[in-house]
Amino acid sequence: MIVETLNPSIPMKENKIIEILLVEDNPGDVRLTKEALKEGSVPSNMNVVMDGAEAILYLQKEGKYEDSPRPDLILLDLNLPKKDGREVLSTIKNDSSLKRIPVVVLTTSNAETDILKAYDLHANCYITKPVDFNKFIDVINAIEQFWLTMVRLPSEIQ
C-alpha cells in the first residue's frame, strides 16, 4: 500500500484532505497518477492497491487495512488480477456503506461492452486511458478539476 500526502503545501479547504483510492496494477500508471495529482491544486492522500481482491479488503477495512481511511473517490482499473474491476465495482455499489463513494473507471478498454457494463454497475464515469504521456496527465488533471473541486462529495456531508 502506498500512502502519500500530495500537495502538503496547499492550504486545505475546510481542513479536509481528499482521500483517493487508486486500484491499479500497472506501476507506470500509478506513478503517472501520483505525479499528476502532486501538481494539482487539491490536497489529497492517495492510497494504492494493485488488485481487485486487495481493493475489497481495503474498502471493507479487513486485515492490514483495518485502519485505512475511507476514500472520497475511487479510481478503478477494469483489468485487474485476482478480482477484476467489474467485480470490485459491483461489490462497491451493492454495499450500502460504500455505494455513495464515487467510482471513476479509468481503464485502457474502449470496448462498448465494457462501457455499458460499467454504467450498468453504477460507475460514476468511464474514462479510457490515453497512451500518450501528456494526454494521460491531462486526464488526471481533468479528473481532479471535476471530482475534487467542482463536485460536492458525499464525504463533505457526513
Image (tube, rainbow, N blue to C red):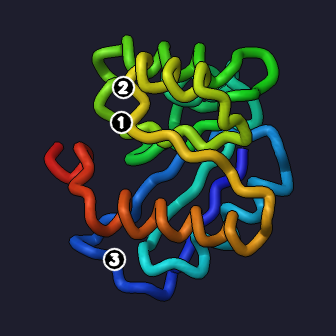
Residue type at tag 2? Leu
x%, y% of residue 122?
A: 38, 24
Residue in the picture at 33% in, 24% down:
99
**Image point (40%, 59%), residue name:** 18
Give the x, y percent position of residue 8.
51, 80
Mark 2, secondary structure of its residue: loop
Amino acid identity at mark 1: Ile
Query: Which one is nearer the viewer's eye here, 142 or 57?
Result: 142
Q: What residue is disc 1 on?
A: 101
Q: Earlier in the sequence, mark 2 or mark 3?
A: 3
Q: Find residue 23 and name its label.
A: none
CB under 8 Å between discs 2 and 3: no
Which residue is the site of mark 2?
Answer: 98
Q: Quadrant of the C terminus?
A: top left
C-alpha span from label 2 to label 1: 6 Å
Q: CA distance from mark 2 to mark 3?
A: 25 Å
The three-letter amino acid code for the residue at tag 3 is Met
Q: Quadrant of residue 136?
A: bottom right
